[in-house]
Amino acid sequence: MALLLTGQESDGLWNGSPQETIRRLFGLHLTVRNSTPAITKALEGLAEEISAGIQTMDPRLTDPASFEGLPFVMGNASVYVRSAFLFLATIFEQQDLPVVRMLYEKLTADLVPASWLQKYPADLNNAMRALVVHPRYASHDKVVNIVACLAQQQASDGTWGENIPFFQMVNALAHLERPDGDAQLERAFHRLKHTQNDDGTWGRRQREWNTFLVIHALRNRGLL
């Protein structure tokens, strides 16, 4: 934990980078659940960046490698940073802050599930990650619509096409209590059963991370 906190600047960010700050906070959420002054300061710094419109170009936001080990994928920078901020604020039990409520409302107002699934799948994935962890927004009409659209797109092999990140979406759906989501997970789990690597991991790249997402999903569904 101390290593993750090292180097935080006065504005709450690390290296002036929203992406580095998101990575640090995600690492901290795997270590602690309750917010600390440093975590609150970092969330405030991200909120300021969002309010400013992500004016400062962070090169990490356009570097696919910087998304490795995160439940998000590279897409529209504004949608991504908002979604990551909302996910982290909720995980650290700050979901009732006015700025968090306002940004959730904006996210759901802007989100058009069918269109985003076809045109902006990365943004759909990132928005979905923020929505499924919130106790109220997990049952929002937009989430219901997302799950329905995903059901129409899911192939017989359990995937949702090459543009929807398979392991991240399996993990996101496993947060929900929806029969149509469970039906998709059943097909996805069948695929996982038959595609596990000899060493017990999944995937060709980021094997440890993919395996973490799978184990977490199985645990959420009571299968472990």
Image (cartoon, rainbow, N blue to C red):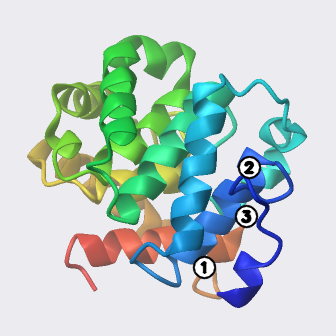
Q: Position of residue 165 (x, y in %)?
A: 56, 44
Tell me what residue is drawn at x 43 percent, y 51 percent: 87
Q: Where 87 sits versus 69, above or below?
A: above
Which circle, 1 or 2, is nearer the viewer? 2
The amino acid type, in three-letter code, at marker 1 is Thr
Q: Quadrant of the N terminus?
A: bottom right
Dot label at residue 19? 2
Q: Earlier in the sequence, mark 1 or mark 2?
A: 2
**Gap in Å between the C-alphas at discs 1 and 3?**
9 Å
Q: Are marks 1 and 3 in contact (CB under 8 Å)?
A: no
Q: Secondary structure at mark 3?
A: loop
Q: Is residue 6 left or right of residue 96?
A: right
Q: Is residue 149 left or right of residue 207?
A: left
Tell me what residue is drawn at x 39 percent, y 25 percent: 107
Q: Which residue is mark 3?
A: 204
Q: Which residue is mark 1?
A: 201
User: Residue 193 sits in which quadrant?
Assistant: bottom left
Tell me what residue is drawn at x 32 percent, y 63 percent: 93
User: Residue 9 sits in which quadrant?
Assistant: bottom right
Q: Nearer the viewer, residue 95 or 202?
A: 95
Q: Position of residue 126 (x, y in %)?
A: 51, 39
The amino acid type, in three-letter code, at marker 3 is Arg
Q: Nearer the viewer, residue 175 or 205?
A: 175
Q: Is residue 59 left or right of residue 149?
A: right
The amino acid type, in three-letter code, at marker 2 is Gln
Q: Where 141 sits versus 61, above or below?
A: above
Q: Residues within 10 Å of mark 1 (few under 14, many from 20)?
A: some
Number of marks in picture: 3
Q: Are marks 2 and 3 in contact (CB under 8 Å)?
A: no
